[in-house]
Amino acid sequence: MHLQVSWVYKSSGNEWWARYQPQDYRIIDNPLGNTADFKHMVKALKMAGVETYADIVFNHMANEAHKRNDLHYPGTEVLQGYSNEGVDGLVLFGNINQNLFQNADFRPAQCIYNYTSVWDVQHYRLCGADPDVGLQDLDENDWMISQQKTYLKTLKDISVTGFRVDAAKHMTGGTWLNNVSL
């Protein structure tokens, strides 16, 4: 038996669509629970013979422009108040005293206008009506891929046995090939 569980990363907001806007992979903290809650749930499911599949979002990150005009990607302020020493038990991996990603880890801000174009869908960002600048589209560089791999390996170490990748059509085959060999 398998159970697909909701998104396991840092996100905020009570709207359903806010769960599709990751702020950071290195910590689980959202209205559905935190890292400790997730680990406890996965362990209980495993003891009951149920495998856990996690829903993940790898093509984009949350838009933080509502906090500051120049903040269009999640940064260190997202993790203020958490302890890198793991005292609170929420840190999954990495150094939370540094940004997970930098501006260079995102593609230029251009919205998808032609959804019939594979190139546009895989290389531009999801936007709403003007003036929405959209969700920051992650570039396929070595740092980004290494962090996503570490995230997946960490979830596997917690006993997550599978993944559902949201918005996979927005990612190129290169992203898939680089993350397949865990």
Image: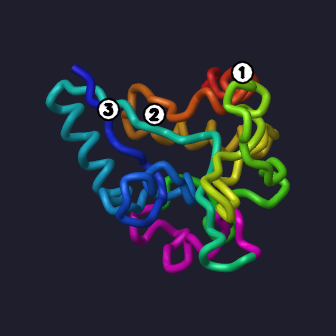
Near mark 3 (Cα within 10 A), the count class, few <14, some 14-19 or many ≥20, is some
Residue 41 quadrant: top left
Near mark 1 (Cα within 10 A), the count class, few <14, some 14-19 or many ≥20, is few
State left or right for residue 149 relative to residue 108: left
Q: Which-is-in-front pick, marks 2 and 1?
A: 1
Q: Which of the two discs, 3 and 2, labels the residue nearer the N terminus?
A: 3
Q: Which of the two discs, 2 and 1, labels the residue nearer the N terminus?
A: 2
For disc 3, the marked residue is 4
Residue 32, position as x, y percentages in the image: 30, 57
For disc 2, the marked residue is 156
Compute the Cα span from label 3 to label 2: 14 Å
**What are the residue bounds of the magenta stretch?**
70-90
Residue 16, position as x, y percentages in the image: 37, 53
State left or right for residue 89 relative to residue 150: left
Residue 160 quadrant: top left
The amino acid type, in three-letter code, at marker 2 is Lys
Determine whether 111 is above or below 5 in the image.
below
Q: Are marks 2 and 1 in contact (CB under 8 Å)?
A: no
Residue situated furthest left in the rendering = 48
As for residue 82 lying within the magenta part, the answer is yes
* 10 and 85: which is toward the camera: 10
The amino acid type, in three-letter code, at marker 1 is Gly
* 66 and 8: which is toward the camera: 66
Main SS class of the magenta portion in the image: loop
Q: Quadrant of the C terminus?
A: top right
Colour scheme: rainbow
> Secondary structure beneath disc 1?
helix
Give residue 173's mark: 1
Compute the Cα span from label 2 to label 1: 22 Å
